[in-house]
Image (cartoon, grey):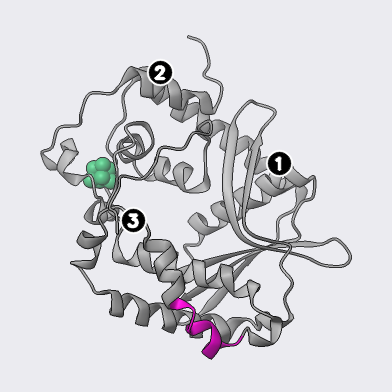
Amino acid sequence: MSESVPAQASRPPALSASSAKQFQQCPLKWRFKYVDKLPELQSPAALRGSLVHKVLEDMFDLPPADRQAPTVRETVDSAWEKVTDGAYKLSEILAQTSEDELKAAARQLIDAYFSLEDPRRLRPSGRELGVETVLSSGLRLRGFIDRVEQADNGDVRIIDYKTGKAPDMRFTGEYVFQMRMYALLYREQYQITPKRTQLLFLGGNPQVLTFDPTDADVSEFETELNALWSDIAAHLQAKRFETRQSRLCDWCYFQNLCPAFGGTAPDLDPAQVEKIAEIGPIAAG
Ligand code: SF4
């Protein structure tokens, strides 16, 4: 199995829910990931998440009657081959855990999924749906929606799987941000505001987090996102990205390059800065 550095996307750069959240969490980490494009070793948890997502995506290729836990659990092996094909430094990820452990954990999460939904009666209109739009401000957005359902009356429901535990319901902001982003992307691409967005948390005690967006809320989010991009663009223009320390530093793959931890960030490549600035407008001045 090859261990190549992930291929650079040939599409124009765009802002995603995860990159926007990354910037809010730490501008320097955002720079390492999205401007310098430093390859990052996946955590075992992230690989397990990719595996479960692949199983749940492919499950809808099965005849409805076969979409039951014992049958779907059996597809973990074939999904594993797909998600690890060309994975960056797979042997290093597997040095932290084993293939068997990851597969066993994935099967548990699949059982948890079946405690939340019965997929035999579901007819998704989209799976791993790539959505891309350019807002009227010129800001380009992109995302992948795990699943879309459209009812006979046209109502749209967006579903995203989370393989971690559900958050404390007092701290759901990060997840609502993601659901608002999906609602905005979908509305801009299909001219329909989803009636419902849901995150299915499969870890721990499985739970569903629901957010029903209104058109006004989606428009408000668009304004917030444009403001966030202005902040990112100002950093690009100044070519300065500050550190923002938090408990997330414990899991930051770039800690050895971070000045807050005694490291030295590499020089910024002006060509890369220019390329990433294509995401959206940068105010003159
Ligand atoms: S270690 Fe912390 S402060 Fe440094 S880049 Fe990573 S997240 Fe940011």
Give the vertical position of 104 relative to 275 (above or below): below
Question: Which quarter is ligand 1 in?
Answer: top left
Which residue is farthest top? 285
Pointer 1 and pointer 2: residues touching (CB < 8 Å)? Answer: no
Amino acid bearing label 1: Ser
Q: Position of residue 144 (x, y in %)?
A: 57, 52
Pointer 1 and pointer 3: residues touching (CB < 8 Å)? Answer: no
Distance from Cα at disc 3 to Cα at disc 2:
34 Å
Q: Quadrant of residue 103?
A: bottom left
Residue at x 39% of width, y 25% of height: 235
Look at discs 3 and 2 and give the one toward the viewer.
Answer: 3
Give the residue pinned by disc 3. 87
Q: Position of residue 196 (x, y in %)?
A: 71, 63
Along the polypeptide, which appears first: circle 1 or circle 2? 1
Distance from Cα at disc 1 to Cα at disc 3:
38 Å
Look at discs 1 and 3 and give the one toward the viewer.
Answer: 3
Q: Quadrant of residue 59?
A: bottom right
Q: Which residues are magenta?
A: 68-76
Q: Which mark is residue 219?
A: 1
Residue at x 65% of width, y 26% of height: 137
Q: Main secondary structure of the magenta part?
A: helix
